[in-house]
Structure formats: C-alpha cells, structure tokens
Image (spheres, rainbow, N blue to C red):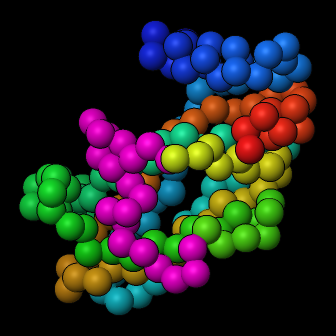
Amino acid sequence: MPTPEQERVMKAVQERYGSKNFTLDPFTFTMNFLPATLSIITNAQFLVQNDSAFAICKTSIVVTDTSDAFVTNLSDTPKVMPFLITLSDSGSGRDLMDTGVHVDNLFGTAQRPYVWTKIKLLDPSSTFTGRLQNLSATSRNVRMAFHGFKVFGDVNQFKAHAR
C-alpha cells in the first residue's frame, strides 16, 4: 500500500498528464555489489519486467563492511564514499555517463535520497546495469536502491509527457 507521500506524488504526476491510460505503482529496484573489492570493477543489474516500464525518481546507497556492519565514516554526510559508478540502460542502448563518477554525485542516503532532476524511464524488458569500482583498500558491501514507479498501460503516453 502506498504511503501518503507516494500517493501525493502519484496524484501530482497523473494530474500533470491529464487523462491517463497508464497506472503508476511505487516500486524500488536494487543493485547489490557484494563485495566491492579493491580496484576491481564489480557488476550488478536489474531487469525491468515486460509488463511495465520503470521511472527512476530517486536513488540511495548503503555501504557496510563485508560482515554487513554499518560503516559510519563512509555513510555519514558529508563524507565522500570511495566508489566510482557507471550506469547503462540496455533498453535505450545508452550509458548514462562517459566514465565512472563518484557515487556521491548520484546517490543519497536512505534518509536523504538523491532526487533526479528528470525522470529516467526504463523501457519494459530492459536491463539496467551498474559497474562499481572500489577506490579504497577495503572490501565493502554496497547496496544501491532505485526508487520510482512501475508504469503499467500506455507507456508511450507517459513517455511523451515525461520529456
């Protein structure tokens, strides 16, 4: 069941698009890099099901040591997390960046997620891939969450209005 905040967001999005032939359902996809080891590029991905598209609105990250204990000095703001990320969308055939960028540029905390300036829509049946490079000398477990909405129904109508 959607929270009151999710209901407000869904209502605002649906009002913006006028009469709608699509339904929005709150959803979170995750990428788990377990573990992210020194200087090695670790891959993770999620698959968008073929019954809906997925609209990314916010992203967050949690970093723990390899025993899943919380790592305070890496996760508290304004500390910098020593990871580079590259994201790719197979549905559009595009990378979202030309080279790895620090995760601090694209991911917030669970309490203060990074809000994307524009919705990123992933087509049905597409694969979203992340490549993470650990710049520290310590292995870490890195969990990334992609918060947004599954878009059921007329994805093209949603896509036309989301631009």
Q: Main secondary structure of the magenta part?
A: loop
Of 12 and 57, which appears nearest the observer? 12
> Given the current orientation, which residue lies at the most extreme left position?
73
**Can residue 51 be seen at all in this image of the molecule?**
no
71 left or right of 19? left
Above-or-below relation of 36 to 59: below
Please tell me how many numbered marks the rendered image carries: 0
**Left or right: where does residue 55 sit relative to residue 109?**
right
Q: Quadrant of residue 87?
A: bottom right
Give above or below for 49 relative to 130: above
What residue is at 45 percent from the left and 16 percent from the top? 5
Horizontally, is 84 left or right of 135 in the view? right
**From the image, which quarter does the C terminus lie in?**
top right
Q: Position of residue 16 (x, y in %)?
A: 70, 21
**Residue sticking out furthest to the bottom:** 39
- x%, y% of residue 150? 69, 33
- Where residue 9 appears, as percent x and y from the top left, is 55, 20
Q: Residue at x 29, y 83 (%)?
A: 135
**Rendered position, 5 above or below 45:** above
User: Which quarter shows the N terminus?
Assistant: top right
- Left or right: residue 43 compared with residue 159: left
Q: Is residue 14 above or below residue 95?
A: above
* Residue drawn at 16 percent across, 53 percent down: 77
The reply to whether residue 153 is visible in this rendering is: yes
Seen at 36% across and 42% down, the residue is 113
Position in image of residue 122 (x %, y %)? 73, 50
Q: Can residue 51 be found in the magenta stretch?
A: no
The magenta stretch spans which residues?
97-116
